[in-house]
């Protein structure tokens, strides 16, 4: 998987030595509370290592799950994904999968613009590689992620139950 750079950040593949950071990140309720229909806390270093293995298994020219680090110093600050999004149970089959972008960052760096900057860099890279549409889904109460979507120039399409078997706010961005 490739590395993507922005002015202040470097998005790189996850490494085994990132396990302690990932465990710290995803064992915090304030970080995971809006992830999926039934958010769960990460409980062990073994869980973190298994999650890193799954993140690294994505072998695709556009999709990926990146560790977000600062460009100077390499401090880990969060996670960014660009991947096909699973439909809710009973969703229509067939056709190309929608591709979602998502992020979660450590509370120590909230408010620094890192989510917007990291997502913008990945969107630019994906559109340069031929992707034509990306969506984001947010919990209706996740105002911070909705603000990031708007800063990215994503269009709010309203509420949907199409993904993750829960109600989400749906945003999209088209190439060009």
Image: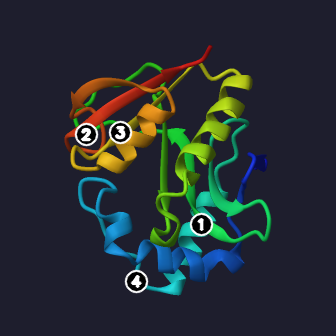
Q: Rounded to the nearest whole Å, what is the CA distance between mark 4 and mark 3? A: 25 Å
Q: Rounded to the nearest whole Å, what is the CA distance between mark 1 and mark 4? A: 19 Å
Circle 3 or circle 1, nearest the eye: 1
The numbered dot on residue 43 is 4
Q: Which residue is mark 2?
A: 168
**In front of the other: 171 or 19:** 171
Name the residue at 50% across, 79% down.
23
Q: Which residue is mark 1?
A: 77
4 versus 98 height, above or below: below
Mark 1 packing: few (<14 Cα in 10 Å), some, or many (20+)?
many
Name the residue at 43% across, 36% down.
149
Q: Is residue 86 visible to the viewer in this orientation of the structure?
A: no
Circle 1 or circle 2, nearest the eye: 1
Q: Which residue is mark 3?
A: 137
Task: Examine the image and state in which quarter residue 137 appears.
Answer: top left
- The numbered mark, 1 or 4, whose residue comes first in the sequence reads 4
The numbered dot on residue 15 is none
Task: Examine the image and state in which quarter residue 162 appears.
Answer: top left
């Amino acid at each position: 998987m490739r590395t993507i750079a922005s002015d202040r950040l470097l998005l790189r593949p996850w490494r085994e030595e990132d396990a302690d950071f990932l465990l710290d990140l995803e064992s915090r309720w304030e970080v995971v509370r809006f992830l999926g229909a039934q958010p769960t806390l990460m409980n062990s270093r073994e869980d973190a290592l298994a999650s890193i293995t799954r993140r690294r298994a994505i072998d695709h020219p556009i999709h990926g799950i990146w560790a977000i680090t600062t460009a100077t110093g390499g401090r880990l600050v969060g996670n960014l994904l660009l991947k096909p999004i699973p439909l809710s149970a009973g969703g229509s089959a067939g056709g190309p999968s929608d591709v979602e972008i998502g992020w979660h960052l450590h509370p120590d760096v909230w408010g620094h613009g890192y989510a917007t900057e990291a997502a913008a860099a990945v969107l630019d890279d994906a559109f340069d590689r031929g992707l034509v549409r990306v969506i984001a889904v947010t919990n209706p109460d996740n105002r911070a992620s909705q603000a990031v979507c708007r800063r990215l120039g994503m269009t709010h399409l309203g509420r949907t139950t199409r993904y993750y078997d829960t109600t989400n706010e749906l945003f999209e961005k088209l190439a060009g």
